[in-house]
Amino acid sequence: MEFIEHQLENPDLSFVKGDLLDPEAIENACKEVDLVCHVAANPDVKLGVSDTRVHFDQNILATYNLLEAMRKSGSKKIAFTSTSTVYGEAKVMPTPEDYGPLIPISLYGASKLACEALVTSYSHTFDIQAWIFRFANIVGPRSTHGITVDFIKKLKENPKSLEILGDGKQEKSYLHVSECVNAILFAIEKSKEEVNIFNIGSEDTISATGIGKIVVEEMGLSNVEFTYTGGSRGWKGDVPKMRLDIEKLKSIGWKPAYTSETSVRETARILLAENK
């Protein structure tokens, strides 16, 4: 709530506090709505290892409830935020939207792929236009989890040592949240198929060790020892290498301004400023 308190007095905003696991509350909220932007989910990939139910309830069931509410209320457009993890350990990189078969290796990725299937099937069956966005790692202000947040927390607890999960060689794309929002709005405006699927990400990658170095620099630390837990992945279900092909999005006129490094550095800087 603290992230939107400054907007609650905005006359253009009508705020409804509800729960996507409460079908009746959603149905009322969906009435007379032109476009539903569905960004609600539990995005903690690692959590699926210890809690096998959380992504089913908060991702799949929540999405089903929302789509049902749209069907009943007559809402005809949805933008759904999916994830690069639906691709699993893709053998083609950068990975395009038509890559397959999609074999997610985390319960989170599986839940998002199930949500995509629900969205596309509701789209066809009930004439709902859909935009599905498969994200790289989205970072920026107000981040509550993820590698940059973890590194800052660890280094505040021990400024002399940083534990990095895996071997530190994991290479992934990172995109600033402002760019992500810009890409979503751009694609909705420019792409008008019944179902529109887009990757959203940067055009490069950065390693886990590289992120560690950025956080150390932004915290003004020196002589920090990096230690590694070992193995090629940070946890069971972690995809060690990820880079999305964004040519489809570029073909309609959008291109990221930030690199992965710029996005991560900006995130570290603002998170440190927020928590002073």
Image: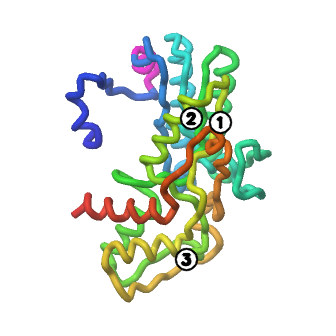
Residue located at (23% from left, 27% from top): 10
Q: CA distance from mark 3 to mark 2?
A: 40 Å
Single out the mark in the foreground, 3 or 2.
Answer: 2
CA–CA distance in space, label 3 to label 1 = 36 Å
Amino acid on which disc 3 is placed: Thr
Q: Look at the numbered discs 3 and 1 and tell me whether their residues touch, using CB distance below 8 Å.
A: no
Q: Which mark is residue 32?
A: none
Residue at 50 percent across and 37 percent down: it is 58
Q: Which residue is at a point 49% across and 34% down the rendered structure image? A: 185
Query: According to the image, label 3 marks what residue?
Result: 229
Quadrant containing the N terminus in the rendered view: top left
Return the residue at label 2. 187
> From which residue to which does the magenta span run?
22-28
Q: Amino acid at mark 2?
A: Ala
Q: Percent x, y for residue 53? A: 55, 42
Q: Position of residue 40 (x, y in %)?
A: 46, 36
Measuring from the top left, give residue 77's x and y in whole percent. 55, 21
N-terminal of the pair, mark 3 or mark 1, is 1
- Which mark is nearer the camera, 2 or 1? 2
Q: Nearer the viewer, residue 112 or 12?
A: 12
Going by the picture, which residue comes out furthest to the front? 253
| Mark nearer the N terminus (2 vs 1) | 2
